Image: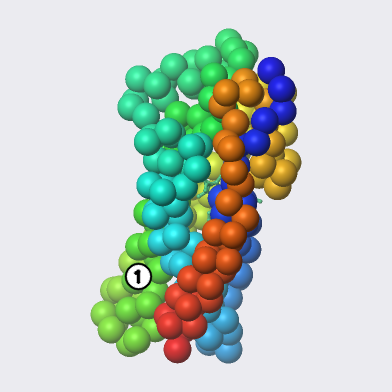
Amino acid sequence: MNKIRVWDWPVRIGHWLLVGAFALAWITGESEEWRLVHAFAGGTVVGVVLFRLLWGVFGTRHARFSSFVRGPGAVLDYVSGLFRREESQYAGHNAAGGWAILALLSLGLLAGASGWLVYQDIGGEWLEEVHEALASGMLAVALLHVGGVVVSSLAHRENLVQAMFTGLKQGRPDEAISSTRPLAVVLLLGWVAVCAWWLAR
Ligand code: HEM
C-alpha cells in the first residue's frame, strides 16, 4: 500500500466550505441582527450541495455516488469489520460513511430550501419550525459523521481528516485518481458565490 491521491480539489474545498458555511449558519440562526449573514451562509451550503450533486456524477472516481453508495449488506460488513479491526477495503468513502454523506447533502438542500422560503416570508411559523428541525437534524448527522471519521481513523490507523486536506490516502496505485481537477474549483467558487448572493438578496 502506498499513499495515493483520492480526493480531488473540488471535493476538498467543497467539504471545508460546507463545514464553515454550516457552522456560520448555525451560530447566526437565532439572531435577527445576523439575518443577512445567516442567509448568505445558508446560500453557500445550498451552492456547495448542488455542485456536489453534479460532481457525484461527473467528478473523479471516488467522488462519484456510484463508487460509494452501497447497499445495507456492505454497510453491515463494514461496521462488523471495524470491530474485527480489519483493514479498510475502501480507497474512497466507506459504505457507512457514504450514507451519512447522502443524508448530509439531502438535509443541506432541504434546510436551505426551507430557509429561503422563510427568508421570503413564505410559509409562516410552521415552516420556520420545519427549517429548524432540518438544521438540527443536519447537526446531529454531522456529529455522527465526525464520530464515524474518528472511529474509522483509529480502526484503520489512518488520519482521514488530514486526507481531506491533502487528498492523499493509503491505497493501491491502480485506485489513484489521475487528475485532481484544480480548475473545477473556479467553477465551484463562482457557482457558490452566485447561489449565496441570489438566495440572500
Ligand atoms: C470539523 C468537523 C468535520 C471533520 C473533521 C470532517 C471530516 C471529514 C472527512 C475526513 C471526510 C472523508 C471521510 C472519508 O474518508 O470517507 C468527510 C467527508 C464529508 N463530510 Fe465531513 N467533517 C466535518 C464536518 C462536516 C460537516 C459539518 C458536514 C456537513 C455539514 C460534513 C459533510 C461532509 C460531506 C458531504 C463529506 C463527503 C465529501 C465528499 O465526498 O465530497 N462534514 N468529512
Quadrant for residue 33, please give it: bottom right
Q: Is mark 1 within 8 Å of ligand 1?
A: no
Packing grade of label 1 (10 A; few <14, some 14-19, many >=20) is some
Q: Who is closer to the viewer here, 28 or 67?
A: 67
Quadrant for residue 182, please give it: bottom right
Q: Who is closer to the viewer here, 86 or 26?
A: 86
Residue 135, compared with residue 27, is above or below; it is above
Quadrant for residue 109, please give it: bottom left
Which residue occupies the extreme left position in the image? 123
Q: Who is closer to the viewer here, 13 or 32?
A: 13
At 62% across and 52% down in the image, what residue appears? 9
Q: Position of residue 117 (x, y in %)?
A: 32, 79
Location of the N terminus (image quadrant) = top right
At 67% across and 42% down in the image, what residue appears? 167
Residue 189, compared with residue 142, is above or below; it is below
Q: Position of residue 102 (x, y in %)?
A: 40, 45
Q: Who is closer to the viewer here, 32 or 189?
A: 189
Location of the C terminus (image quadrant) = bottom left
Asked if one can make out residue 197 in the rendered structure from this viewpoint, the answer is yes
At 40% across and 68% down in the image, what residue appears? 112
- Asked whether, in this view, residue 33 is left or right of residue 117, the answer is right
Residue 150, compared with residue 119, is above or below; it is above
Residue 106, compared with residue 73, is above or below; it is below
- Asked whether, in this view, residue 136 is left or right of residue 84, the answer is left
At 69% across and 36% down in the image, what residue appears? 168
Figure disc tally: 1
Q: Label 1 belongs to which residue?
A: 113
Q: Amino acid at mark 1?
A: Ala
Q: Position of residue 21 (x, y in %)?
A: 58, 66
Q: Position of residue 8 (x, y in %)?
A: 59, 46
Q: How is the image coloured?
A: rainbow
Q: Say what secondary structure mark 1 lies in.
A: helix
